[in-house]
Amino acid sequence: MILYGFRFVFAQFRRICEISLRLARRGMAHARLGRASSTDDRWRLRLLVIVGAVLMMGSGSLIVGVKVFLAQATRSVTQANLLGGAGNQAASHVTVSGPVNVLLVGTDGRPDQPADLGRADSIIVLHVPAGHDKAYLVSIPRDTLVQIPADPSNEYPGGQDKINAAFAFGSQDGGGVSGGIQLLARTIKSAYGITFDAAAVVNFAGFQQVAGVLGGVTMCVDEKTTSIHVGFTDSGQEALPFTQDANLQLSPVAGVTPQVYNPGCQHLSAWQALDFTRQRDLLANGDGDYGRQRHQQQFIKAVFKEVLSTGTITNPAKFSKVLDAIGKAMTVDTGGISIEDWIYAMRGVTDAGITTIKTNDGQYDSITVPGIGSCEQLSDTSLQLLQSVKGDTVGQFLTAYPDWISHS
């Protein structure tokens, strides 16, 4: 999200450059045409040249100042070589040009659960077209049935499984998060032909801290959502509203009323936003994981929008706290390109230009596979969507399938 936070700085810089060049060229044109005949004209000419030169020097100073500012502001962002040899930049000249694909993996570590590197709650492809003026969020259902390539680094032989198992198998035996990301990226490339320029691991629990610094986020709840994690007793004490048995069957806890999110646009506190994005069991439309994926996309977009709001980017103290929180909630692989260059390259993407898309149109298409269990199949149209990501034609796809846009 920090890729977009400084676009206003560069807009001012570009404006200064344009003015300086215009003034300098105008002065030189006057000189070539011999129009500095009078004393006043000569002084005007000198003024044009001097002002143009000063602005040119000022713009150069601004470049240095912007770089220093960006380096200082982004110092808290955790960076790691997540993609390794699985990324596009591994075998090419490092540059931000043309269409860009970023692999986002969402994890949801919670205080009441042990840490598990293999847990990947969401897999999202962030696609930015060649014009760098839009961004599309496309989720791949975590239970999607795929063929996972072998991983020589830990002797995993490869085989058919759910796609989030690729992250689990890659992270085992010391592979860690980087190993998980690399095998997942190779799996997506093998299955759909999509390659990645950058990657990020997003901890949704950590994003609660980001939302807290922001003072909450505004989200449009699209279906009645009942929390199985947060409830309240008659006296107002927080308590678990349901228990869950070994077969994942829910049983309500007597005397505890679950938190309910009713449809409509509303401002959610940090804990409410995170709780809402975690739910998949008691969604009114019965869309389970698809609903949760959609709500996670909405949450990310809502945070983007709040970070880019005037009340955040014009408040240095608040903005610094936001970046610190983001740095703790995310680990990014910039593909060998500095964060400052990413920010500049993505300056044309605004919150209004971010579109979330429903895979499988948000509908289940499940099959049972012996030894694996219930898995999702991607429809032919979903495969077209992923091909449009590969071919940088997502805009054309959405023109043909406008109902696949998830409105938030």
Image: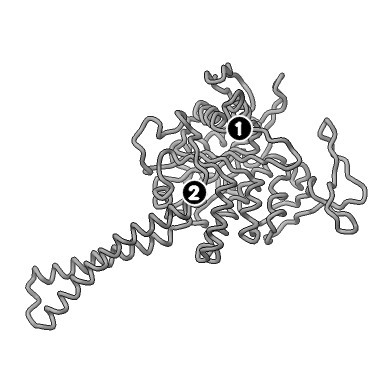
Q: Amino acid at mark 1?
A: Leu
Scheme of image coloration = one colour
In this view, 369 is above or below 365: above
**Residue 178: percent from the left, percent from the top?**
54, 32
Q: Which residue is mark 1?
A: 378
> Could you say which is closer to the camera, residue 97 or residue 39?
39
Helix, strand or loop at disc 1? loop
Q: Amino acid at mark 2?
A: Ala
Residue at point 51%, 34% (across, down): 82
> Could you say which is closer to the camera, residue 70 or residue 305?
70
Helix, strand or loop at disc 2? strand
In this view, 120 is above or below 65: above
Q: Which residue is mark 2?
A: 135
Name the side, left or right, on which 13 lies relative to 159.
Answer: left
**Residue 163: percent from the left, percent from the top?**
61, 29
Residue at point 89%, 45% (across, down): 253
Residue at point 69%, 50% (across, down): 274
Name the side, left or right, on which 253 lies relative to 335.
Answer: right
The numbered dot on residue 112 is: none
> Could you say which is closer to the camera, residue 325 or residue 361?
325
How busy is the neighbourhood of tag 2: few (under 14 within 10 Å), some, or many (20 plus)?
A: many
From the image, state whether disc 2 or disc 1 is nearer to you.
2
**Residue 144: percent from the left, percent from the top?**
63, 30
How busy is the neighbourhood of tag 1: few (under 14 within 10 Å), some, or many (20 plus)?
A: many
State yes or no: discs 2 and 1 in contact (Cβ < 8 Å): no
Q: Earlier in the sequence, mark 2 or mark 1?
A: 2
Residue at point 25%, 66% (across, down): 20
Distance from disc 2 to disc 1, alpha carbons, whole Å, reads 22 Å
